[in-house]
Image (cartoon, grey):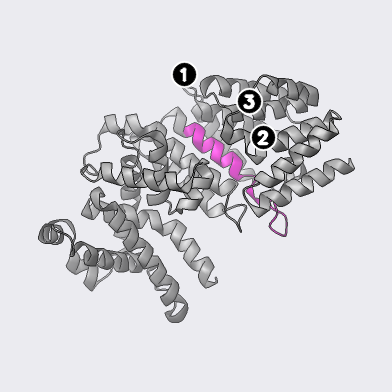
Amino acid sequence: MSAPELVEDFFRHEYGRLVATLVRRVGVQHLAAVEDAVQGALLTALQSWPLRGRPKQPSAWLYTVASNALVGQLRQGRRRQELLDQRLPVASAVQAPPDITVLGSEMQDDLLRLLFVCCHESLPEQTQVVLALKALCGFSVKEIAQRLLVRQASVYKRLERARARLRDHRELDDLGPAQYEQRMPAVHRIIYAVFTEGYLSNHASQAIRSELCREALRLGRLLVQHPQGQIPETFALLALMHLHAARLGAREDGAGGLVLLQDQDRSRWDAHEIAEGLQWLQRSAEGDRFCRYHAEAGIAAEHCLAPSFEQTGWQRIVQCYELLERISPSALHTLNRAVAVAEWKGPQAGLQVLAGLEPPTWLQGSYMWSAVLADLHRRCGHEAKAARYRELALDAAPSPAVRALLRRRFAQTLCD
């Protein structure tokens, strides 16, 4: 593994666990200092490991370097003696790395706790997502802004406000059933946001980041092990992620380009992932609770079970989108329903779905909106409109991989 790949791997897998464990020791009010210390440890690994070799216990090594750096930062604070004597075991952190088995177990518990702390009810919903993506997943401000369709300045402001609000909260050990239940929807949103970033990344050089998908699935499995997490919504979310993960291997070509659903080699889909997704979907049907993840998992299941793109159960997919629009209204869901209707009843019917829709600015300016309209108008013979929307879609593409996919798709349809 090359040095950049090595550090990227450890950054994504260790960052959140290190932050969560150190926050548990010094308090959530020092979240910013913890993040700085962890980032510094990872940079040190980038410089040291290629020269000296990877340590036998990399997690413990990173923990030791980060905790020592954190001690140095806290020594400069006003509450030096209290922090050093009562909150952080400095001597053990400096003299020897912790036992890797104990550390790994602690990190799992701490990660889940911090995930719920990031979803503090005093924080606005989008701020919760921003904080968790930064603190637990190590997303850059730019990556967060691209994923949430907001400006980078807005992300900075939300992070600062979140850290300020949490500065006086010391509740990592005091989360009770009421807090877990109240914050569960936000936790689900965050886990799915991480998976979505991996499934179709805005990263300039990586269209698919499978390590983020694995991290989201790991968080989902961790959540479902907690008594408060054993609910239909969690089961449905796990079903959705497993069913999407089943197609990851077929979503890229040999050159790293994206492959559309209709062009994917279905023999490359992971049958084990599909089976696990269907098991979670079946379990999610127990009881009378229904959420957006149920509807989306139902759509994913229809795609995974269809023998071919042409034989997909488009009518059932349309029905799922109608349910999704009722329980979680969004212009994006309407756009996706229009695509499914077009496959079921034809492109003119798809355009009719969108005829009365006034999309929000973020969607109207996205490549998805323009690409769908380009395809539907072309299939209806409206060449001038199709050409205009093709240009808009290419201009709005968030990454080179998406832009290349659009070019291939448009070239293919023009030849049909």
Question: Which disc is residue 365 wearing?
Answer: none
Question: What separation in Å lies between label 2 and label 3 (alpha carbons)?
Answer: 11 Å
Nearer-the-camera pick, 241 or 194? 194
The tag earlier along the polypeptide, 2 or 3, is 3
Task: Please give the label number shown on residue 369.
Answer: 2
Q: Residues within 10 Å of mark 3 (few under 14, many from 20)?
A: many
What x and y, as percent, mark residue 312?
Answer: 74, 31
| Residue 246 falls within the magenta-colored stretch | yes
- Residue visible at 63% across and 39% down in the picture: 366
- In the displayed structure, 127 sits above or below 290; it is below
- Residue 288: mark in rendering: 1
Q: Is residue 17 left or right of residue 402?
A: left
Of the 4 image quadrants, the one containing the N terminus is bottom right
Residue 113 visible in rendering? no
Q: Amino acid at mark 1?
A: Asp
Numbered tag placed on residue 334 in the rendering: 3
Disc 1 crowd, CA 10 A, few/some/many (<14, 14-19, 20+): few
Q: Position of residue 416 (x, y in %)?
A: 89, 40
Asked if residue 235 shows in the view, the reply is: yes
Spatial separation of the CA atoms under disc 1 and disc 3? 25 Å
Q: Check if residue 252 falls in the magenta segment.
A: yes
Q: Give x and y (percent) for residue 263.
A: 77, 44
Q: Which residues are magenta?
A: 235-258
Distance of label 2 from label 1 (alpha carbons): 34 Å
Label 2: element kind = helix
Mark 2, other Cα within 10 Å: few <14 / some 14–19 / many ≥20: many
The type of residue carrying mark 3 is Thr
Could you say which quadrant of the image residue 119 lies in?
top left
